[in-house]
Image: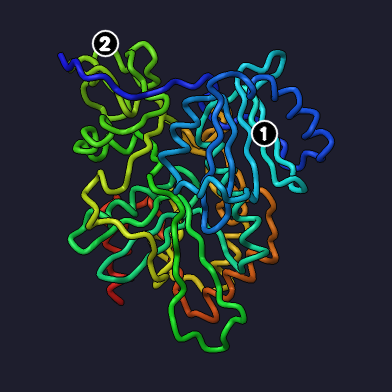
Amino acid sequence: MNNQKLNTYSTESRARVKGDKRTPPSEFQRLLAKARPALAKPGSLSLKAELEGVIIELRTNSRHQAEFWANNWTQADAAAPPDAWIYSAIGVEGHEPSAYYSPELRSALFVNTEYYGQCKSWALGIAAAILERKANTLSIHGATALYKGKGVVIIAPTGTGKTTQSFQVFMSDHGKICGDDWAYVRFPDPVPDVPSAPLIARQPEKALYMRSESQKEQEWLRAVFDRSLNENVVTRKEECDFVEGDVGCSVTRGRCVFNDGKRWCYYSFGNSRVLVRREDILGPDKVVDEVPINHVVLLRRDDHSPAEVRLTPEEAIGILQKGEYMVLPGAGPKEKWGSIAYEPWYNPYLLEPDNERQAYFYRLMFDRWKVPCTILNTGVEGIQASHERIKAALDGG
């Protein structure tokens, strides 16, 4: 029996809670006043993060969120004035788990929820709103990787495999990981008529906030996850969503890991997460903080579309703006799994979305910079086949 302990934390809300992204300043201040007594208790923390030059301050009495925040972002100078604020208070009596954002105040408030994913995504969304207007920057919800010196940006709705595909590039002989969730692309101002240098995608996070279920496809990741920070990983077989019979697992069609003597399972719950430092996976030499944008890959998952389609700029922008996808387990409320939903630009993090500005940036990328865009269907061929298509695209084949 393995006596090792896992550094995991179980949040009461294990997914995003209902949010109001247009909370009027007066209402926000009223809600914040209600949360302030909890934030004033001993043990509350204030931490500043720097996201592509934007300073965001987190004030929270959740040790879990503070720990993940500190390990996820680059720490800002303590004397740097914040550009935005996030307040996260637990123990607020008489208030259901909720989230609020006031664009005018550039402030977010989380009440009685410690789930880090929503806090992280709103931090990215706040920075995106600031950078889009002040620094000519496009924010992309996507994974970035480098192969033989060429960069790929993989854009897809949650659950269709962007992390899996970026990892395939990462693990190849000539591959490196940049990020698995977000990229900033800063355009020159003024925009040149004929660009002489590629666009660059930068990621703001020190760590990867991954679905821990990815371990079922890569057994060796268990050792990496075992020494990382975890959220909502199942440590009791009774809490597993995928028990089959006495000893079976409906996910792997194999034997339950708990029956093999293991004390936790990384794929017993569809939305358990792990915060893993990029260099802890395959070493610092396999990590980069930015990549040139040489190809954009969109992903979809269905049983009828072609395996690969090369898109015109307008086709790519149309698909991105519509953002149609199927809600997969772990990607939303359980009652919506299997239904069709829409996520413009495949980016649920945008707190102040501007469709015209998004289309403008992508049109520059595809038209002015001539970045090719391909859509792959991960529902009709295996992971390796899609990976080979990405490598061929970067090789120029």
Q: Residue at x 45, y 46 (%)?
A: 73
- The amino acid marked with disc number 1 is Leu
- Graded by Cα atoms within 10 Å as few (under 14), some (14 to 19) or many (20 or more), the crowding at tag 1 reads many
Q: Residue at x 37, y 29 (%)?
A: 230
> For residue 94, what is the image quadrant?
top right
- Graded by Cα atoms within 10 Å as few (under 14), some (14 to 19) or many (20 or more), the crowding at tag 2 reads few
Q: CA distance from mark 1 to mark 2?
A: 44 Å
**Disc ID at residue 109:** 1
> For residue 174, what is the image quadrant?
bottom left
> Which of these two is toward me, 307 or 353?
353
Placement of 278 over or under 151, stated as above or below: above
Q: Mark 1: which secondary structure?
A: strand
Q: Earlier in the sequence, mark 1 or mark 2?
A: 1
> Which of these two is toward me, 218 or 50?
50
Q: Residue 186: where, in percent of width, then height?
A: 54, 68
Q: Residue 240: where, in percent of width, then height?
A: 37, 18
**Disc ID at residue 246:** 2
Q: Residue 32: where, in percent of width, then height?
A: 73, 29
